[in-house]
Image (tube, rainbow, N blue to C red):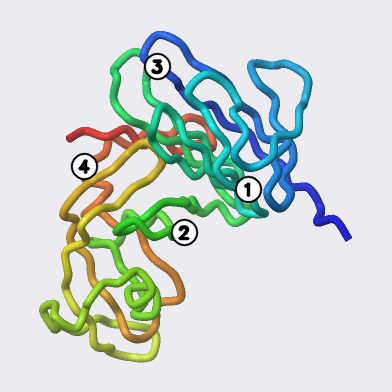
Amino acid sequence: MRAPALFCAFALFSGAAHATDISVVGLFPNKAVLVIDGGAPKTYAVDSTIAAGIKLLSADNSGATLEVNGKRQTIALGDHAGRSASSGRASVTLMPDSQGHYMAQGQINGGAVRMLLDTGATLIALPASEATRLGVSYKNGQPSYVKTANGTAPAYRVTLDTVKLGDIEVSHVDAVVQEQGLPFILLGMSFLNRMEMRREGEQMVLTKRY
């Protein structure tokens, strides 16, 4: 039985002066239904060329991964990724979930992750299971402890090689790995303090500062 379609919209910028607008109106295993520059919906299979310099690499129920001018971009449901034509700086726009939280699809050390934006977290925080999956040798980091709902838990201070969110990529980002009490990755201020953050209605726009 065919999986149900999921719906989202985003725009990918193919250059500083021209933008190709791509809306994802349906997602199926290895296929995506796309609207290009407001045209009629069209189904694209994985490895299809969508427009000049844009290729569909993969599609599943969490979003579509495209190659844009040689760069890989994974677009989560409801997210918008692009490069500002006016400033030339990388930016990403996040939409809140039903609880008002901003979840972001990105990469840590090249591995796909989903993170909760948390301005109250000093550092990016990873559960030990996620750190292990991403190849982070966290037990070689600086031992410490963190407070959880169940008391204190062991943690390790580490440095992540790269953290990527849409077009934004930051190197050498401080993080902490927790062995207990953390169900998902928190995108904390060690990443966010390198961004300009602004609200546009319900949207959260992050633009790389440096």
State left or right for residue 55 relative to residue 116.
right
Say if 110 sits above or below 45 in the image. Answer: below
Identify the residue shown where x is 49% and y is 41%.
Answer: 94
Separation of disc 3 and disc 4 at Cα?
A: 23 Å
| Sequence-first tag of 3 and 1 | 3
The x and y percentages for residue 144 are: 15, 83
Asked if residue 40 can be seen in this view, the reply is yes
Residue picked out by circle 2: 114
* The N terminus sits in image quarter: bottom right
> Does dot 2 land on a helix, a strand or a loop?
strand
The x and y percentages for residue 8 are: 66, 39
The x and y percentages for residue 26 are: 74, 40
| Sequence-first tag of 2 and 3 | 3
Label 2: few (<14), some (14–19) or many (≥20) C-alpha neighbours in 10 Å: some
Residue type beneath disc 4: Arg
Residue type beneath disc 2: Arg
Label 3: few (<14), some (14–19) or many (≥20) C-alpha neighbours in 10 Å: some
Residue type beneath disc 1: Ala
State left or right for residue 114 relative to residue 122.
right
| Sequence-first tag of 1 and 2 | 1
Of 140 and 193, nearer the camera is 140
Label 4: few (<14), some (14–19) or many (≥20) C-alpha neighbours in 10 Å: some
Farthest residue toward the left? 142
* The C terminus sits in image quarter: top left
